[in-house]
Amino acid sequence: MNLLIRGGRVVDPANNMDQVADIYITNGKIASVGAQIDVSRHDCEVIDAQGKWVFPGFIDMHVHLREPGYEAKETIATGTRAAARGGFTSVACMPNTNPVIDNRALVEFVKAKALAEGVVHVFPIGAITKGSRGEELAEIGDMYQAGAIAISDDGQPVANAQLMRLAMQYAMMFDIPIISHCEDKQLVADGVMNEGYCSTLFGLRGITRAAEEIMVARDILLAEVTGAKLHIAHVSTRGSVELVRMAKKKGLRVTAEATPHHFTLTEEAVGNYDTSTKVNPPLRSAEDVQAVKEGLKDGTIDIIATDHAPHTVEEKDVEYNYAPFGMIGLETAWGLIYEELVEKGILDLKEAVAKLTVRPAAIFGLQGKGSLTVGYDGDITIIDPALEETVNPDNFASKARNSAFIGRRLKALPVYTIVQGKIVMNNRTL
Ligand SMILES: NC(=O)N[C@@H](CC(=O)O)C(=O)O
Ligand SMILES: [Zn+2]
Ligand SMILES: [Zn+2]
């Protein structure tokens, strides 16, 4: 089936394009982009995109799909549907499943399952260490050959610096990034929210920003001695932003991501004791949020990723201290990016789209993705700038409900998600 997307405002940062144009997709690939494409001779489905924004399909490099092992929280089927509903055409999934994705067979399992049951592209991330226990390296070369696009022990730090150095050297042989979850467990101890005035006020145990920053600093130093590609996950403090900025000034191959919840919410959101606000790293102070926004603006923070971390209602419906860390994000990400970054003048539309498309594709080497270049995959996200909606968990495609944004009004929402020329989400439904 051929697809023509007619008359939308086409924004493609990679090709420095922002103009009204048509896009024609055949055999799942972009065949042409231009004014008034004539397809009268072809059998063709047409989307009227007048008044809509047409972007390369969004890419989320930090998602927890929870399969295998935690299917009560999310599955590849439901997680990819949540992605599609959020306008994402590709996701990379973290290996902190049960068992942990630390060998070739499990990478192949995720890929096969995603092909059979997923509705968007899924790129598996392999573990750094076996079982993410931080003791011995996982089968990194094997996982790379099976299709792992990066390695990470996300959810856990690699506490042993020597092991982290070895992992970096190993990852360099395949030129893949190592994604670091920066957390010093001893410093975190049994903290549940950011340490400061609010934690005192709310009577909750605090987590010092140093717990994150010490590991950001350590991993940057290791990236300097090894020359490895280091990607810092979920940057949340001013200090972390400054460290990454310094690393980039030195010319190191260091990149970073921020999540929508970390640039939208502050620690004050914890005050209602909604366990959805319990995330790792924790929601920080207004000053940190400001620094993350500055980092996004000046390019210190390269990409936006959701860290979609689904948990069951039963797991989250407990006292704050006992709830697991994590918040879902796929279905609310774009609305928050638009409101917090674009409308507030931090990023223009092209810059915001770049952090969800061409930048992640470049950092993680995703071939044929991230732009509307002819011959690239026909992955497209269409936004209706006039569409507003209140976040309602009944409409979530995710199995989970742990969003701190329920009840919030979001605007400029995705109305079509197109994967290799196939419409997988239409008018907010699948
Ligand atoms: N971010 C979280 O709060 N939780 C993540 C783990 C992680 O991303 O570190 C999870 O797997 O639930
Ligand atoms: Zn993490
Ligand atoms: Zn994560």
Image (cartoon, grey):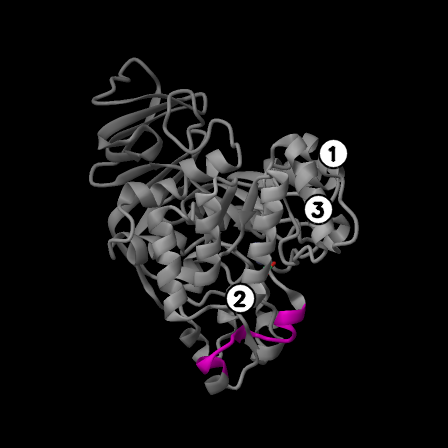
Q: Is residue 391 visible?
A: no
Task: Please report contact status of discs 3 and 1: CB closer than 8 Å, yes or no.
Answer: no
- Type of residue at label 1? Asp
Label 3 vs label 1, nearer the camera: 1
Q: Is 374 placed above or below 360 here?
A: above
Q: Which residue is mark 2?
A: 279
Can you give x and y, in whole percent of width and height, for residue 354 in the image? 37, 40
Q: Which mark is residue 70?
A: none
Q: What segment carries the magenta color?
A: 186-199
Q: How far separated are the C-alphas under marks 3 and 1?
A: 12 Å
Which residue occupies the extreme right position in the image?
136
Crowd band around label 2 with a 10 angstrom C-alpha radius: few (<14), some (14–19), many (20+): many
Residue 359 lies in quadrant: top left
The kind of residue on which mark 3 rests is: Ile
Residue 184 visible in the shown view: yes
Discs 2, 3 touching: Cβ within 8 Å: no
Q: In the image, 298: left or right of 123?
A: left
Residue that numbered label 3 is attached to: 101
